[in-house]
Image (spheres, rainbow, N blue to C red):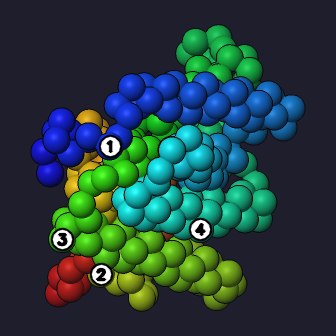
Amino acid sequence: MSGPCPDRLIAADVMTMPDILLFNLALSAALFAALWLLSIRLKDPSFIDAWWALGVVVLAWATFVQLPTPGAHALALLALGTGWGLRLGIYLLWRWGKHGADRRYAKLAENARKQHGLGFAAFSLLWVFAPQLLLQFVVALPVMLGQTNADAAWTIVAQAGLVLAIFGIVYEGVADAQLAHFKSLASNAGKVMNQGLWRYSRHPNYFGDMCAWWGMWLIAADAGFGYLTLPGPLLLTYLLTRVSGAPTTEPHLARTKPEYGEYVRRTSAFVPMPPHP
């Protein structure tokens, strides 16, 4: 799982790696700019959550089509990045269409207006779209760089990564489906979701997300890009655990659901564990 070694990159045209990344970054920036303009028209940037996933699909395919000879790692990462991104992106688009603007972005926009005098367009660009462009690009490093060494041998490290990534994608999908079904029942209004996978973790969807990306990182590491792509899963883990994941959802749930405090006491935050008595 070390960084790229010269003997592992003989068949890869290392001079094309910066070109691939620069092309991908320019493409991603253009798409983010178009979506920013759409957010101004809608007065709502909430759909960016779906693009967080769907944009990874674009980056995975943009990398793949630039490769002269894709290898096993490229095919695996293309399939995993596409599967992860389409599943999550379509789900988040459905959620946005069903529930409308995300309260978190509305609150951020109001704070930006009151504290910094920013209009919606400036807020949407500086606080939402520009940061997510950079964050998405860093998170997607394993899916991009991990594809570029066609001659890397497929070892047990990549096999473990493939299993972990598939497990994570499925686990996250099941958790999201269980939560969506729970919320669809009027009888559950005001109740805490503590069934299925949510019985063993307060954020099983985030746990699955982390498993998926650490699995894809293992495949990239097996291709010789362990050090260069490590910021991707590290950043994702940090965001989910410290910034935009649990920290933005748990305070709201604690305020609006009286039973949530007891649920927190009994239930592991991320790693699935048997509930505490």
Image mark for residue 156: 3
Q: Which of the image's four quarters has the C terminus?
A: bottom left
Label 3 element class: helix
In space, the residues marked 1 and 3 are separated at their CA atoms by 21 Å
Instruction: Tell us which disc is closer to us: 4 or 2.
Output: 4
Earlier residue among tags 3 and 4: 4
Earlier residue among tags 2 and 1: 1
**Rendered view: 194 above or below 207:** below
Instruction: Tell us which disc is closer to us: 2 or 1.
Output: 1
- Residue count near mark 3 (Cα–Cα under 10 Å), binned few <14, some 14–19, many ≥20: few
Indicate left or right for 253 with 236 as reference: right
Who is closer to the viewer here, 149 or 193?
149
Label 2 element class: loop
In space, the residues marked 3 and 4 are separated at their CA atoms by 27 Å
The residue beneath circle 4 is 87
Instruction: Tell us which disc is closer to us: 1 or 3.
Output: 1
In space, the residues marked 4 and 2 are separated at their CA atoms by 23 Å
In space, the residues marked 2 and 3 are separated at their CA atoms by 29 Å
Q: Amino acid at mark 2?
A: Tyr
Q: How many marks?
A: 4
The residue beneath circle 2 is 200
Earlier residue among tags 2 and 3: 3
In the image, residue 91 lies at what x, y percent? 64, 66
In the image, residue 151 lies at what x, y percent? 31, 53
Q: Residue at x 26, y 36 (%)?
A: 228
